[in-house]
Amino acid sequence: MLAALRAAGLFGVRFDLARLEGPLAALGSPERRLGQVVHVGGTNGKGSTAALIAAALEAAGLRVGLYSSPHLSRFTERIRIAGREVLPDALGATYARVRSSLDGLTYFEQATLLAFVTFAEARLDATVLEVGMGGRLDATNVVASTVAAVTGVALDHEELLGADVAAIAREKAGIFRAGRPAVIGASGDAAATAVLVAEARARGARVVWPPARAPHGGALALVGEHQERNAAVAWAVLDELTAETGGRVAVSDEARRRGFAAATWPGRFEEVVPRVWLDGAHNPDGARALAAAVAALGARRVVAVCGVSSDKDVPGILAPMLDVVTTLYATSAPSARALEAAALAGVAAHVAAGRAAVLCEPDPFVAVEQARRDAGDGVVVVFGSLFLVGPVRARLLGECEDQLTVTDPAR
């Protein structure tokens, strides 16, 4: 299965939902058998928000599927039922059974349809879908969702989604449905909010504003002020889901608090071992949120390990973090898309302008160990790319990884 998916990566990224019509029909229209569907998009925070929603639904006793991307260490992380990754052998058997219907589709298209088949056969009460990229033409958007949410919009993937936040917001708003709630979060660039509202109304969706702060009573396992904004979106989504289903899918405040307290989202400001934090921040908006969360730790010394993809706004990612770190180790993520460590170190030294020491260590695992020694009783923050965070996390925790690395293709 992994080899076939890896080969499908050669098709790159294609935005054309019509490509999926035939394969979905051949598979028996699994996208129509997912239970109540929540669709979550946004530049940053969509994965955390989706995880919070799924955890609350599960705490209410519902059988829930969660589809997310990308994965950190194992492809099966993308497809979860009742809080657990699907079993590799079972997923491989499903893929072998449906593969002929997936031929010619891209990697993400195949992954998405495989998730739909898996979820349809699991007889779920609800499915939470995280948008892969954009929204309007993302493969997940073939589903008629009950509630859709956009956490916020900032610059990222401009080469495919548009050169400014207005253009990107229009793409993100493509998941809003006529006659259905459109929850609009407060993360990202404030200038995008008006565009999201206009697009929602043009599509006939009902605009819903989250509370300023979710009334979870402090029961939020995900760390950082930015997660409070995600929790607010999740809370509003659950309100709307209850209303839209006439109470058939209802999540009490108590179940929400239990779900929020139990929710996990690996690699997103996660303390994996004492004083070592990992975060996949890979755009300037995400880096600003991470820098604020790091500052709130109040550590005397902060040593960062950074690796980024070559197609990202590298100075924009580095600048916020160089305000809060003592030393930064520039490294290279184990990915074909990674910027070389020496090039990253050069950019970092220029952006730092003496505010922080910048060192170059191409091997990410060596860089992390050196950073841990350097930090002493301070903290280490590994950031810049999920392609870096995933392998580092697996190494630190001793978790298994796929024997064949399959990553999302270059944009």
Image (tube, rainbow, N blue to C red):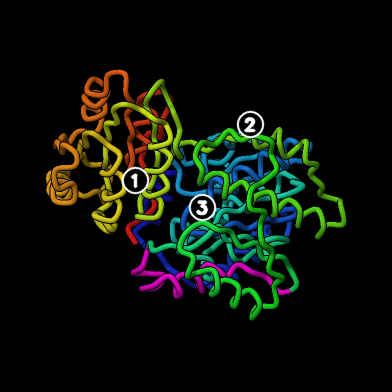
Q: What residue type is disc 3 on?
A: Ala
The picture quadrant where one finds residue 60 is top right
Q: Can residue 137 be seen here?
A: yes
Real-space CA distance between mark 1 and mark 3, rounded to the nearest whole angstrom: 21 Å
Mark 3 and mark 2 in contact? Answer it, CB < 8 Å. no
Which residue lies under the disc numbered 1?
Answer: 385
Image point 52% across, 67% down: which residue? 172
Residue 359 forms part of the magenta stretch = no
Q: Nearer the viewer, mark 1 or mark 3?
A: 1
Q: CA distance from mark 1 to mark 2?
A: 25 Å
Residue 161 among those drawn in magenta = yes
**Contact between labelled residues 3 and 1, with CB atoms less than 8 Å apart:** no
Q: Position of residue 247 (x, y in %)?
A: 86, 52
Q: What secondary structure is the stretch in magenta mostly built from?
A: helix
From what the image shows, is residue 192 above or below residue 63?
below
Tell us which disc is closer to us: 1 or 2.
Answer: 2
Q: Residue at x 15, y 38 (%)?
A: 358
- Which quadrant: the C terminus? bottom left
The residue at which mark 3 appears reads as: 111
- Label 2 Cα crowd, 10 Å radius (few <14 / some 14-19 / many 20+): some
Residue 267 versus residue 98 in the image, above or below: above
Residue 399 spot, x, y in % from top left: 43, 25
In the displayed structure, 191 sits above or below 259; it is below
